[in-house]
Amino acid sequence: MAELEFAFDDVPEPGQRTSVVDGIDWIRLPLPFRLNHVNCWWLDDGAGHAVQIDTGVASDTTRKHWSQVLGKVRPDTLLVTHFHPDHAGLAGEYAAAGVRLLSSEIEMNLCARIWHTEPDDYGALYAEWYRQNGIDESTALAVAQAGNSYRRIVVEPPRMSEFTWLDDGTEIELGGRRWQVMHGGGHAPAMLMLFCDVDRILIAADQVLPGISPNISAGPVSKEHDESFGLREPNPLARFLETLERLRSLPEDTLVLPSHGMPFRGLHMRIAELVAHHDDRLNRVREACVVPRTAADLFDVLFGKKLDAQQMSFALGESLAHAEHLRLEGRLDVDHSTACTRYLRR
Ligand SMILES: [Zn+2]
């Protein structure tokens, strides 16, 4: 296979759904970001039991789309792949409607912890993280004033006791198929993926996307908590690459259903492209650190374009994930002697 094979020429129209294979429909919801859509999946066993995968962000636009697609129908089960707003945004409303909830315990703990952070604390955490890593003071002040941005696009999360947890390696029957549950790392700490061996289908969440790399981000660490906010993991890029290695054991002709972009075949090729993409970024970071650099100094090297406020925290997390990976491998040193953290080639 020389190129990825896309299974469809067109995306589902707004408010419509497209049948991917028997028993799996594709629903595409708009997002109010530069990343302008998220794919959700609807699994139906043909005997009246339906499973919805992810919800979109909490907004009236999302609610309108779901009601156009489904009318008044609710799924029996909602599976939330990970804590990000475009996946978990409306989970609380499904819980209130009595829908059974499946997710990953680490992901939903993170969702609740972020959601319940007071706006001042949330803003202060991000502002301090920005300053520490060399972002200018006016941007740091703006993020401090923005408060808890997560809460604006996620409704109050369900209680932990309302979920059934899906552990890595377990098997589950959903929508008339048997699925192996896999946890992916790097983009989120324990993101759910589902693999059906018989039909060779991977519901990949954000782990393997066809057009872009998922954001691999080392998030801010709260001083009050001993765990990181965006990620508890000090080396998310290593976890991401390890998960890609695991996914290499799946067949090359697996139909991949990603949360962004088009369904495709060519899993091994896409994994190789993603590994090469991050290798290239690691090399660029290491080369740039011939003089001491903050994570913000690396934006030009990694992104080469002006970033808007919403891209800034993704960009900072991504820069840090690459710099920290190199540091933990012994290829960069870190200097904490000034107000900002700087990285320097060994
Ligand atoms: Zn995500």
Image: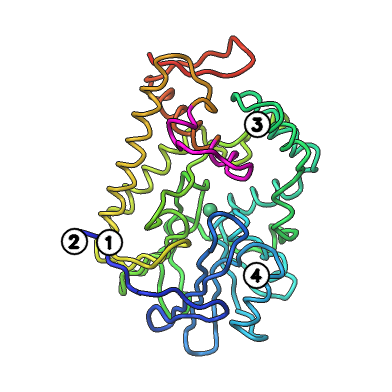
Residue at the (69%, 28%) spot, across then down: 128
- In this rendering, would 240 be left or right of 67? left
Q: Residue 130: x and y, percent?
A: 64, 30
Can you tell which mark lies on residue 4?
1
310, 163: nearer the viewer: 310
Q: Quadrant of residue 159?
A: bottom right
Residue at the (64%, 48%) spot, across then down: 110
Q: Disc 3 designates what residue?
A: 226
Q: What's the CA distance linking mark 3 and mark 4?
A: 35 Å
- Whether tag 1 and tag 3 are in contact, CB under 8 A, the answer is no
Q: Measured along the vertical axis of the image, is residue 188 above or below residue 163?
A: above
Q: Residue flagged by tag 2: what amino acid is it?
A: Met
Looking at marks 1 and 4 on the same chain, the residue that comes earlier in the sequence is marked by: 1
Looking at marks 2 and 4 on the same chain, the residue that comes earlier in the sequence is marked by: 2
Outermost residue on the bottom side: it is 47
Residue 313 in the magenta stretch? The answer is yes
Q: Which residues are magenta?
A: 298-315
Q: Measured along the vertical axis of the image, is residue 129 above or below residue 88?
A: above
